Amino acid sequence: MAAFDPDLLGEPDRLLEGDPSQMLRALATAGAQVRRALTTTREAGALDLRIERPRAIVVAAMGADDVVADLLAPLAARHSPIGVWPCHDSPLPGWVGSLDLVVAVSLSGRAPGPVRLALEAGRRGASVLTIGAPDSPLAEAAARGRGVHVPAEGTGATSRSAAWSMLTPAILALGALGVLPVDATDLDAVADRLDEIAEANRPTAEAFVSPAKILATGLGATIPLVLADGPLTGVAARRAGTMLARTARLPVMVGELPDAASQLLACLDGPYAAAPAPEGGRDIFADPYLDGPPGAEVGLLLLRDRDPRAGEEGGRVRGGEAAAYDADAPRVEIGPQDAARINLAQGIVDLAERRGARVQQLSPGPGGDLVRLAELMATLDFAATYLALAHGLDPATVPALADLRDLTG
């Protein structure tokens, strides 16, 4: 692997040349994926499932496809008494029966875990919704269980770049069941925000303007510690962990406040910690690429949900300073939960900076839960892809994963 080359992020021709699988192009289709999936979901009949109100929902997915369960579970927890349970390659929980819904997801339609779980759900009389390639074993499993299959074809590269082809049908179906307060209008807003993020992070965007390129530049000098300030940003943090590991091939730690603070921040005092300046904090004149430490150092990426007091300015990548809000806007009183979240996150930024750690923060612009989450995820997807390219790696092709598939059959 080549050394990290931040200059490459400012050279669009070289970026595209180093992306033979066109991962950047595939990520830029996220908005189109949502719009296409809105149509295919309706046409497949996923809005008319034979169950009216499920007792519980099990989401069967593996690998990068697991983003579906990861997103649905916290959104349902915020808005519905109906629980969403992730399930990977393990047996279907014994309590699943005719009162429950099983959503099985595999872009290829061949992942053994989701196919097996969909078949078992059908045998038990549960309602079955599958999302994946048409004319696949997963589609056949839905047919055997008298379920509904929504075709989701890849838009290039890998399942990592087709997340919204799988997320949209599941979100829309759960919205129709009343589990999520989401309808097609909300997903139209998601598609529009994804288009905005793709435009802001296009290969021709200046490296000092594109949020994803700014993130990539900072992350390229560190072993990332990705910390989320709550359950919603926690979904984006776990997506960041997937993309940074599988796309950029970086070792990464991921956690969510308040529980993970001690585990991640302990690393700031460990063998990979940055060396603080003599008076404390980070040396503002240090160049990590010219005179940085001989080995990698940990750095903190803090994902912060939107401050309710913020104005209409969109989300952005920041250094360690506190998030700015519009002092001229009408005064907004924040509740104790928001106040605690904001204060804890800023306290952690201050703590990390005193130890000389490189700190970056990412917050979304205005919008509903799903829109804000989509912005964070899309920005992080682009950042991980730019990181891979700046290391001289093909972001879509991971030889070790091919070897793993050979081992697991």
Image: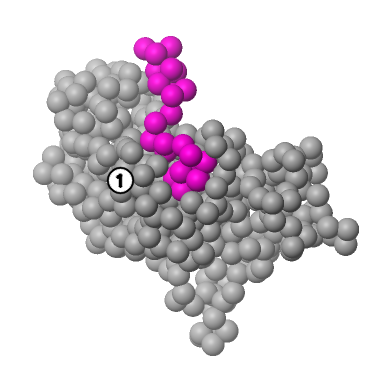
Residue annotated with mark 1:
26
Q: Is residue 393 magenta?
A: yes
Residue at (40, 21) in percent of width and height: 402
Residue at (27, 22) in percent of width and height: 110
- Viewer-proximal residue among 51 and 66: 66
Q: Give the prevailing secondary structure in the magenta stretch.
A: helix
- Vertical arrangement, residue 193 with respect to residue 406, above or below: below
- Give the quadrant of residue 205: bottom left
Magenta-drawn segment: 384-409
Q: Residues within 10 Å of mark 1 (few under 14, many from 20)?
A: some
- Vertical arrangement, residue 226 with respect to residue 85, above or below: below
Residue at (56, 76) in percent of width and height: 325
- Viewer-proximal residue among 99 and 205: 205
Residue placed furthest toward the left = 43
- Vertical arrangement, residue 214 with respect to residue 404, above or below: below
Residue placed furthest toward the right = 278
Residue 29: x and y in percent read: 28, 51
Residue 6: x and y in percent read: 55, 52
235 to the left or right of 180: right
